[in-house]
Every structure is written in structure tokens, then in C-alpha cells.
Image: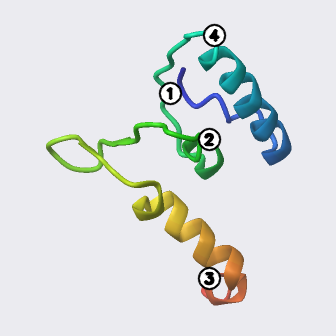
Amino acid sequence: MDEPEAPLSPLRQLAFLSMLKDMVNQDSQFIIATHSPILMAFPQASILSFDSYPVKEVPYDQLEQVTLTKAFLNNPESYLRHL
């Protein structure tokens, strides 16, 4: 799947994760290209980063999308003052 979160609100992304979990429990497998920290948080997902060569598995909490989102949510003013 390519960027399945594009049309989804954060709440709907969580619902999508629930659907994925149900399908994984029925032995389904997925390859998902995403920038969504919510989707990347799927339990026991293997997260592969294509940001540099060679492609490598990256822990969730070390992903730029995750660290930047956390930093922004913790202090949006520090980012928005540069607008």
C-alpha cells in the first residue's frame, strides 16, 4: 500500500490499524509505504528506512517523522515563530 493514510484523519488511521491487526491475525502480510507516525507504530512492524543507502531497519523512536512530530507537538511555538 502506498501512503494509505493520505485521506485519513488521525482517528481513522487508528481504525485502519485495528483493521490491519485483524488481518495480520488471519496471517495477512503488508508492505506499506508511509510517512505517518501513527501507522509506523504498528506493534512488531519492521520499519525500513530508505533515507540512505543501504536500506536499513530503524527503531520507531529514531525515525525523523516520529521525533519531529513529538518535538512539534511538545512546543509548536518554537516551529511556528519561524513562519
Q: Residue 83 is drawn in which quadrant?
A: bottom right
First reached walking from the N terminus: tag 1 or tag 4 = 4
Choose the circle earlier in sequence order: 3 or 1.
1
In the rendered image, residue 30, in percent from the top left (x then y), is placed at 51, 19
- Taking depth in this image into account, of 6 and 46 the one nearest to the observer is 46
The residue carrying mark 1 is 32
Distance from the alpha carbon under mark 2 to that under mark 1 = 9 Å
Which amino acid, by three-letter code, is at mark 4?
Answer: Gln
Q: Which residue is mark 2?
A: 39
Q: Amino acid at mark 3?
A: Tyr
Q: Earlier in the sequence, mark 4 or mark 3?
A: 4
The residue wearing badge 4 is: 26
Instruction: For marks 3 and 1, give the one nearer the viewer.
Output: 1
Where is the N terminus found, in terms of image quarters? top right
Contact (CB < 8 A) between labels 2 and 1? yes
Judged from the image, the secondary structure of the residue bearing numbered disc 4 is: loop
Helix or strand or loop: what does disc 1 sit on? loop
Asked if disc 4 and disc 2 are in contact, CB closer than 8 Å, the reply is no
Q: Would you say the residues marked 4 and 3 are in contact, meaning their CB atoms lie under 8 Å apart?
A: no
Residue 72 position in % (x across, y down):
64, 76
**Mark 3 against mark 2, which lies toward the viewer?**
2
N-term mark: 3 or 2:
2
Between circles 4 and 3, the one closer to the viewer is 4
Foreground residue, 8 or 16? Answer: 16
Which residue is situated farthest in the right direction here? 11
